[in-house]
Image: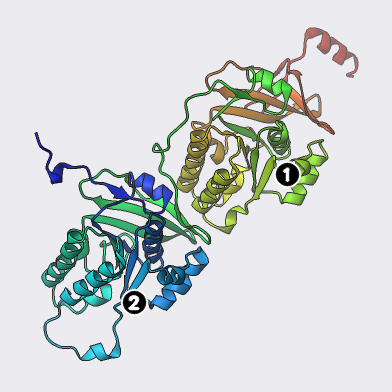
Amino acid sequence: MRTTEQELPISKVSSGIAGFDILSRGGLPKGRATLVAGSPGSAKTIFATQFLVAGLQANEPAVFVTFEESPEDIRRNMLPLGWDIARWEGEGRWLFVDCREHDSDQGVIGTYSLEPLSLRIKHAINRIGGQRLVIDSLAALLLRFPDQNTIRGEIQRVLNSLKELNMTAIITAERVDEYGPISRDEVEAFVCDNVIVMRHVLEHETRHRSIEILKYRGTAHGRGEIPFTIGSDIGISVVAPLLQLASPPASQQRLSSGIATLDEMCGGGLSKGLIALMSGPSGCGKTIYAGSFAVSAKQERCLYVSTEEGTGTLMRDLGGCGIDLEQAVAQGQVQLLTIPPESTGLMEHLISIQRAIDTFQPERLVVDSLASFERSAQSRNFNAFVTQLADYTRSRGIVALMTTTARLTGNASLAEDQILSVADAIFLLRYIEVFGEVRRGITVLKLRGSRHDHGIREFSITDNGIGIGRAFRNVSGILAGTPSHSGTPEEERVQSMFEG
């Protein structure tokens, strides 16, 4: 049986945004028009320009039809993103079609038609052999038409002409309400084969950007709002959707935690791709454990994300415990990424970490501490941040150690609650009072796929790092935060001799 043209799978072209290409299962449908709708400032023009830039990298000349901004403004605005449009124009690979309204147009009367626009676009495409097109945007032009039926017919005329030329196109449209009608006129969404919505929502005094594929006619795509950010050197970065990242095969290879006794407690170390949570109250040694983990293997690189201490302070504090982080950084073994959590939104931080991972290609990751991100976010956003970060590191076979601050009573914090199901290993650190003396304890609460020690061991912080000793005996209630000591009869007899 012969397959008709309509039954053939729809091919796609890259948008130039890796995360969006994952969400859309390959990019934008080839030979079709996609409506990109958003409120002012939602990055519609940047998305459209990045799409054209990706085409240039694939030797597909670009035509940009502008109705609002001047070509000069677009050139200037896109230059900080590393896109030298003027150079591409000089090379004959980029062509502007300036359709802005001029004073001489104000006196035009009678029936208005988009047929002249179609002819101008066709001429520009033929002139440079264009394969990708952007129309930014039709909103100003559509105000000239008396009703929606006329608008629909005129837009369809333009789209039909583009389809005849097999053009892959983006048409931008304005929105008034972030969660209201798709566009100001709404007609474009019904006529276009594909609809993408970009949002820039104010939530708890912070702006959050997101993108959603509302319609992809005849082709599969991911669903829901996906966060994105804009980088000064790469343009738009979209957070790769969960469950669509390819994970490497499970590995039996073990990496050292940096402390031999802890490796023994974990049955020989930590497996590749494992996500570990280390939880404990302030001052009980989480950062020192993290530092030992970061520098322990000379042949393995580690990305160290610090949210609470600056570079100098961190190096000084770890150096006092015999952990030479400064040398590890100088030798390229460790890369420090210092992040002030309140400086921007959680998803912007997530993308910064992902970019650092892609650039540095580490085998290990430290995030110290999740509690700082927790303080600057709402519960829903924090949960998404933790889950996305864990999924991203696991997909690359990276061993990740994330710390969080537990309450002194031993009750779980929000950060613990959110990551307990995500973490493959959980280490609990606790303060323990024994006969009027405060000591520290560590236990492996959870370790997926491996045997592990179930005891609560005493550990100490020395000039040479962490020393883990034997398990506590005759002490109960440690994990609950209410430790109590039950001595042996001989101990009780000796103790009574010194009591009045």
Judge left or right: residue 234 versus residue 429.
left
The local secondary structure at tag 1 comes to helix
Q: Is residue 363 above or below residue 26?
A: above
Distance in Å between CA atoms under marks 1 and 2: 49 Å
In percent of width and height, residue 407 lies at 64, 38
Q: Is residue 96 left or right of residue 378?
A: left
Read off the residue under disc 1: 329
Q: Residue at x 29, y 48 (%)?
A: 12
Density class for disc 1 (Cα within 10 Å; few <14, some 14-19, many ≥20) is some
Mark 2 closeness class: few <14, some 14–19, many ≥20 residues within 10 Å? some
Q: Which residue in the protein does label 2 denote?
A: 68
- Mark 1 or mark 2: name the one nearer the start of the chain: 2
Q: Quadrant of residue 201?
A: bottom left
Which numbered circle lies on residue 421?
none
User: Which amino acid type is shown beneath numbered disc 1?
Assistant: Val
Q: Report if the CB atoms under discs 1 and 2 are less than 8 Å apart.
A: no
- Residue 346 versus residue 53 in the image, above or below: above
Where is residue 174 drawn, in percent x and y? 30, 68
Q: Which residue sits at x=20%, y=91%?
A: 107
Residue lying furthest top: 490
Residue 288 on image: x %, y %: 73, 36
Rendered image quadrant of residue 324: top right
- Please state, as top left, top right, bottom left or bottom right, where the C terminus lies in the image: top right
Q: Is residue 432 visible?
A: yes
Front one among 252 and 223: 252
Q: Is residue 431 left or right of residue 449?
A: right
